[in-house]
Each structure stands twice: as C-alpha cells, then as structure tokens.
Image (cartoon, rainbow, N blue to C red):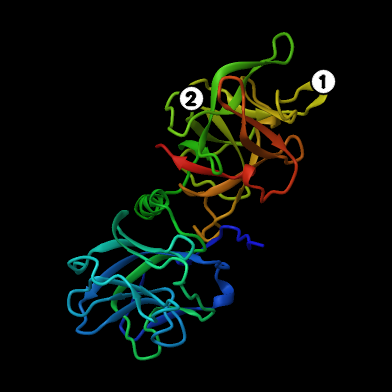
C-alpha cells in the first residue's frame, strides 16, 4: 500500500537573521513535516563575505556524507552547490550552478528533490537554473534520514557562511515551477491585508477564482440574489475582485490590518453587494450538491459575516491576514459552515460554490487570498 502524505510546510526562520561561519540554527527531525520521498526548501540569502572554503547553507544529516538535503556555497565565489545522498553514492547532485552570488545582494533560492521523479532542481530568484536527473531509475534511490536540519555551520567540520538568511521554508513535497515562483513573489511582495484592500480568493484545489456572473437565485418576489461561483484560473478583474470590510454593524478604520479570527465581510467591487449565505429552509439550496447557497446580497445583515482560519500559521507571527495566506472562511449567521467549492460544474462550465459543515481540513474548504491593491 502506498503511504499517503498530506502536504505540509513550515517556516523555520521568518525575519532575516545574521550568521557567521560558526553560527547555526538546529531544527529537530520530529519538528519537521513528515517526508515520503520528496522535499523542498526555499529561503532568502544575502552573502556578506565570500569564504575561501566550502560554506554550508543547510545540511540534514549526522555526518558529512549523510546529506539529504544539502546546499553549500563553493569556495571564493559562492556558487550554489546542491547535493544529496543516494544508495549508489554518498555525494550526488549539481556542481557549480552559476557564476557565484554577488555580495550584499538578496537572493531567493529553491531546492527541490524527488525520489519518485528521480530529480533534483535548483531555482534562483524564481527561475529554474539547473537540474540533476537520476539515470538508473529502478536501481538508484535517494536516501533520506531522520537527523536534525542545520542552517549554517554543520557541526562536523563544515563551516557556515557570513551573511543573512530569512524566510527559510521546509516543504514535504517537490514544489512545481509555478509554486516556486509564487514563493519568490511572496517573499518580496508579502503585504498585510487591511480593511479596504481589494482582493481575490482562489480555490486551492481547483485554482479557480471566487466570482459571480449575475446569475440569479430566485428566492421569491423582491428577493433575488446573484449566485456566487468559481469561474476560471485567470483572474477577471470585473467579476473576481472583492473589498475587505468590517463585520455588519461595526466601524473599522480603512487601512488597519485584518487580524485572524476576526469577523469580517467582503463586498463585491463591481456590484457593491456583500458576500452572503443563509439557511437552507424552503429549499434554498444549491442546484447540484443541495448545500447552503452562497450569494451576493444587496442588503446588509449578519448573513454577510465571515470568520477566518489560516492554515500556514507561521507565515506572520503577529497574527495578521497576509497576501498569499491559505485560509478557510466560516459563515457566522448559520453556525459556521465553511465556504466550499468542488470540481462539479454547473451548466455554463463554472464551479458550484456553497457552505457546508464538515471537516475543516478538507481540501474543498481552502482558499488562497491574493492582494490586488
């Protein structure tokens, strides 16, 4: 039976810290996401001084040649030198990946490794720069280990680097090129969501944007509300943009940060109506799944109130909602069912959006928030 590993990641170092070649940060294996044949590490790095010796950025292993994963800088010019341990060799990977890092300049680096896909890839500032492919795919395997991950000095003769490092993230899957680019942009464009922000919500599992097309739910005379859907993997600036507002009946200051676990609302930018849901009495259900309807509503009441849960909890230690966060939204007025979508399509090719009770970790409940302005 194939072991299923839930995708998890953790930010080990957030704000930049300074390290010398003798400094290190140690993270125990048990505190890292469980890995099953795949791992990725992303980080920001600024080298202050080139070393005349090999300099370790990160190393997971108890000995110099137990090294899955390992990233070093070459002597004198600080070129990236990514390695791992295989069952045919203890020192496998890519030799110099570039002409060397410039001093006093921030770089975004991504290291991705997959035994099932038999490859190691390295990215610099979001761009794919080099890869290593395992040739004998049946016989040769990557050997992972349960040793601590060390950032900087590796404690067994390998010195670290003189510089700064931040936003060190450890993932238990091989990041795609698109995910690496998203991580790169998050590092340099990471901003808080504030009241008045114009945002979009992307359904994580299907990558489609929360939207409306002006299709009506007929809820009786004088009470027709526009259906909310997911519609396309490219943003429609007319139909997919929402404004973050305060909860019904509250006063908030435009420009102040939105805290997690706060009740808020979303106003559709083009229509001026609020994201809304209501009970399912009198057959007020969605057309396919028969779940709780989600609409935009031209009035204001507690049916417009939502509370946020964030999944990437280490992204901002101050507890603010941030651009790029993975969140779930829970509807207050109907006892906190979650905002959901799924791959089931409506007749026009859009995805049904609804609220339902259930496991809050379910993939249908997760949305990525994107700051438009």
Let me know if residue 111 appears in the view. Answer: no
Per the model, the C-alpha gap separating discs 2 and 1 is 29 Å
Is 44 situated above or below 64? above
**Mark 2, residue position:** 239
Q: Quadrant of the C terminus?
A: top left
Q: Is residue 219 left or right of residue 177?
A: right
Q: Is residue 101 left or right of residue 117?
A: left
Total marks placed: 2
Q: Could you say which is closer to the camera, residue 91 or residue 21?
A: 91
Residue 141 x %, y %: 46, 72
Among numbered discs 2 and 1, the one appearing first in the sequence: 2
Dot label at residue 282: 1
- Quadrant of residue 221 within the rendered picture: top right
Please report the residue visible at 62 percent of the width from the left and 36 percent of the height from the top.
342
Please report the residue visible at 72 percent of the width from the left and 40 percent of the height from the top.
337
Q: Could you say which is closer to the camera, residue 97 or residue 319?
A: 97
Within 10 Å of disc 1 (Cα), the crowding (few <14, some 14-19, many 20+) is few
Q: Could you say which is closer to the camera, residue 334 or residue 45?
A: 45
Q: Could you say which is closer to the camera, residue 205 or residue 108?
A: 205
Residue 20 x %, y %: 31, 81
Please report the residue visible at 46 percent of the width from the left and 37 percent of the height from the top.
197
Q: Secondary structure at mark 1?
A: helix
Let me know if residue 226 appears in the view. Answer: yes
Please report the residue visible at 53 percent of the width from the left and 46 percent of the height from the top.
258
Residue 326 x %, y %: 54, 49
Dot label at residue 148: none
């Amino acid at each position: 039976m194939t072991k299923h590993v839930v995708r998890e990641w953790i930010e080990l170092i957030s704000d930049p810290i300074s390290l010398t070649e003798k400094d290190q940060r140690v993270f125990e294996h048990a505190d890292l996401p469980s890995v099953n044949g795949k791992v990725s590490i992303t980080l920001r790095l600024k080298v202050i001084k080139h070393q005349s010796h090999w300099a370790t950025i990160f190393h997971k292993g108890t000995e110099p040649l137990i090294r899955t994963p390992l990233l070093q800088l070459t002597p004198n010019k600080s070129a990236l030198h990514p390695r791992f341990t295989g069952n045919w060799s203890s020192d496998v990977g890519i030799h110099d990946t570039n002409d060397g890092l410039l001093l006093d300049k921030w770089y975004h680096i991504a290291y991705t490794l997959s035994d099932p896909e038999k490859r190691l890839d390295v990215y610099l500032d979001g761009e794919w720069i080099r890869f290593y492919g395992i040739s004998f795919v049946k016989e040769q395997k990557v050997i992972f280990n349960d040793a601590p991950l060390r950032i900087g000095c590796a404690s067994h003769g390998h010195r670290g680097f003189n510089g700064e490092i931040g936003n060190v993230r450890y993932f238990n899957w091989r990041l795609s090129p698109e995910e690496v680019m998203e991580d790169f942009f998050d590092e340099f464009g990471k901003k808080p969501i504030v009241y008045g922000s114009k945002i979009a919500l992307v359904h994580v599992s299907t990558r489609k944007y929360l939207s409306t097309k002006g299709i009506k739910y007929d809820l009786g005379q004088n009470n027709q509300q526009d259906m909310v859907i997911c519609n396309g993997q490219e943003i429609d600036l007319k139909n997919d943009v929402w404004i973050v507002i305060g909860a019904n009946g509250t006063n908030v200051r435009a420009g102040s940060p939105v805290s997690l676990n706060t009740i808020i609302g979303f106003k559709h930018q083009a229509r001026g109506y609020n994201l809304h849901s209501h009970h399912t009495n009198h057959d007020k259900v969605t057309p396919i799944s028969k779940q709780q309807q989600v609409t935009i509503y031209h009035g204001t009441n507690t049916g417009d109130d939502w509370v946020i849960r964030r999944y990437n909890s280490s992204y901002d230690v101050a507890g603010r909602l941030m651009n790029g966060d993975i969140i779930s939204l829970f509807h207050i007025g109907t006892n906190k069912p979650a905002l959901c979508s799924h791959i089931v399509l409506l007749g026009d090719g859009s995805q049904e959006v609804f609220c339902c009770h259930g496991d809050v970790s379910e993939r249908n409940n997760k949305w990525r928030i994107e700051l438009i302005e």
